[in-house]
Amino acid sequence: MKRVVWPAYFAESLSSIGSTLLGVGIFFYTEHYFRWTAQQNFLLASGQGLCYVAGSLAADRIVSRHGRRPALVAIFLLTTLIPLIALLSPRPQLLVPVLMVYTFVIATNWPVLESLVTSGADAHAMSKRVAVYNLTWSGTNAVTFAACGTVIARWPAGMFILPGAAHLLSAAIIFVNRGIDPNDARTVPSEHAAAERELVARRTLAMWLARISLPATYVVVYGLSAMMPSLPVMRPLTTSMATLVASIWMIARWLAFVILGATIWWHTRPRILLLAGVMMLFAFIGVAMIPRLPAMIACQVLLGVTLGIIYAGSLYFGMVLSEGSTEHGGYHEALIGLGSVLGPGAAALAQWQWPGDLRAGVIAVSCVISVTLVAAGVVSVRFGRKSG
């Protein structure tokens, strides 16, 4: 049976619609309809992060028992039904548990899709597949989030109907395309195999730097997403315009993926991840603290580029070294969940100590990022000594 990869990309794009609306856009929804404060959004984000970690780590066990394709179909059918439950009574008492269950289930789908995309490919083919994968989900992510404010303002039920419809279509696509996961898929030997073996040491360093830095990126993503509706620079904007402005960093991240996917220079420069992490910290502070919209937008551009570098490095180096395993995909996604627990969790604690002071949340998130950067720096130095 001929191997096909495009259904995985298609399903990935559709999944991004649901995860964006209910994982990031939901903070604008809660602020708009429930008048939630930043602290309440921080707590929601942290709870979703815990569920995301659990779901990501469960993916490999689910696949081992049921297989990748049947598991994906079941996951998508569940994520079709779960958001629709919120339509019964879109109040916090029901919405929050629904979001927790949805986050757990949707988290199990990403490691499986990542494995389907990258397995059976050598390092060079995998680089191209990872590039397309990143462009697909991040492009859908940016477009969906930019339009999210309009959905919230004009069709609030769409926040739950659109994810359900997208996941149902994903289930159908995976179900009818049996060639997406042939049993005889094998890694194709590369004529560059010898050269690739010489790069293992650098890739190992890059993987560890990325594993340390990746949670920091989602400390930023979910810390910033939860506080974005409450930023003073955003308050004069309508909900429709606010999510459009807030999506600029996502657009910049997509452009970074375009550049990284078209080049390979970063494959042998793992310490660029550390530099990107430092720039990410300053960009985050700029977005959260600068009161003028043009300067805040400029910081968003820098933030998106740095986030793209770290994410692409983490996924590529990890999948190359693990030969596209679902297990590593689970670790990759669990690190994302860890970041969404630590960042919003620290910010919520700071808000509890200093109620109403958004700067306390910014400082707390910045401290968590700084700790991870120090850890990445220590790993880089020690690795350099060993290889020297």
Image: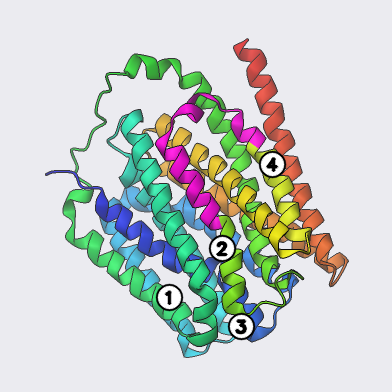
| Most frequent secondary structure within the magenta stretch | helix
Segment tinted magenta in the rendering: 250-275
Across and down, in percent, residue 326 comes to 39, 44
Secondary structure beneath label 4: helix
Residue type marked 2 = Ser
Across and down, in percent, residue 68 comes to 30, 51
Around disc 4, counting alpha carbons within 10 Å, would you say few (fewer than 14), some (14 to 19), or many (20 or more)? some
**Nearest to N terminus: mark 1 or mark 3:** 1
Marks 4 and 2, Cα distance to the nearest angstrom? Answer: 19 Å
User: Residue 279 bears which disc, if any?
Assistant: 4
Across and down, in percent, residue 388 comes to 63, 10
User: Residue 247 bears which disc, if any?
Assistant: 2
Dividing the picture into quadrants, the one containing residue 123 is top left
Which mark's residue is nearer the viewer, 1 or 4?
Answer: 4
Secondary structure beneath label 1: helix
Residue ranking furthest to the front: 294
Which quadrant of the figure contains the N terminus? top left
